[in-house]
Image (cartoon, rainbow, N blue to C red):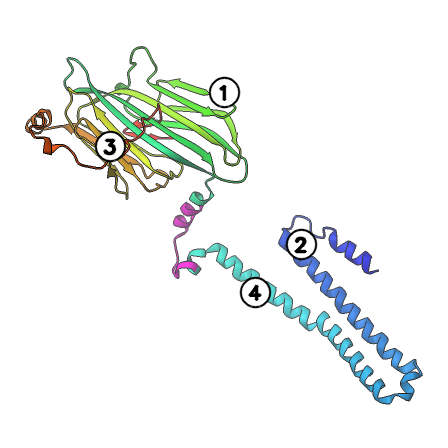
Amino acid sequence: MFDFLTKNLRQPKITGGSDEDQESHDSRLLKALYSWVILLLGACVLLSVQVVPFFEEHKRGAHFIEELAFAMILAGLFSLTVEKYHREEFRKFVIAERDKLKRNVFLYAYGHNVSEQTRQEIRDLLECPFHREQLKLTWQFSHIPNVPDRVRLIRRVTYIQRNGTMQPKPYSYKFHYNSAATALERVSGEPIQTVKIRRKGKADINLNGLSGELETDGIETLQPGEELEVSVTLTETRITTGEDSYSSRHPIIGTTFVTISTDNQLKLKIEAYCKGKKLRTRADHVPPDYNSWQLDEGTLPFQGILVSWSPLPQSAAATANAPATAPHLATTSPAVAPAPDAAPGPIGPGTTQN
């Protein structure tokens, strides 16, 4: 009988329930089985005291066995009634408190409430399975002959896209570039936008276009820990005073490198910013021709990197063109490796998101 009951305990009793519910169900059955065993054993011992001749000659032993049998019967009845009710009520209380904690963990963790919209944004961030690493952003400005109020701008971005979860996740690449259509033009017959996605063991994916959006569903699924090498190049003509930004729809971790360079015929004042973060200049930062920063902190989705440029005043441009006249003016900064060259990658004028 005992083998039969334990066999039934191993069989699933709850369809559609969680493992925790199944475990609680099995535990209740096992406790009920033990209670009935104790109750029946006490009843058998009590009956044996009345019919076994040995206890007629040993009255004190018989009284002790009777009290023990009564105690076993009461314990079994208590376990099947009062204790069972108390246990169920306590379990309901724990479940109710746990549900409150799930609904508003901020109230328990920080002692104050957080609006539902804010909580939803945080949940979306925590549930995002993808992140980016080794982000490199590059802007290259060059002059256009006989067009003094325009510059040629090439933007490059490279990064590693990784599935940080332990489960396969569907993934589709989407690149959005927000800019005036008149600013886009072909250079040497090549498309204005080129995207290259490299995946280990798979054929490279190449996207070309003149529109502001590129996407592909050819990746389908990223396995746990799998990574993609993504690079994008965009080329356009911009006015000599403007701004540009790059933002990612996924979190970015690790160090981000930002490099902005101009040719010798352009003298631009260039600035770079990150929303809520401070960019650190690198040792190879030599404005106005070569500007190099790095961000040592991670960024949230759409936090973004913003750059701006404008022509230098004539006096500042003349100073920038003047050669150094004394050797002590040379930099004494310790040697730090410059930011790695960025292969073609995603970045956009006005706004670039991918």
Q: Position of residue 238 (x, y in %)?
A: 22, 22
Q: CA distance from mark 2 to mark 3?
A: 59 Å
User: What kind of residue is marked 4?
Assistant: Phe
User: What kind of residue is marked 2?
Assistant: Gln
- Identify the mark nearer the N-term, 1 or 3: 1
For disc 1, the marked residue is 203
As helix, strand or loop, the secondary structure at mark 1 comes to loop
Disc 4 versus disc 3: nearer the observer: 3
Compared with 195, 248 (above or below) is below
Write down the region rendered in magenta. Answer: 109-123
User: What kind of residue is marked 1?
Assistant: Ala
User: What kind of residue is marked 3?
Assistant: Ser
Q: CA distance from mark 2 to mark 4?
A: 19 Å
Dot 1 alpha-carbon crowd within 10 angstroms: few under 14, some 14 to 19, many 20 or more: few
Q: CA distance from mark 1 to mark 3?
A: 34 Å
For disc 2, the marked residue is 22
- Identify the mark nearer the N-term, 1 or 4: 4
For disc 3, the marked residue is 292
Compared with 101, 167 (above or below) is above
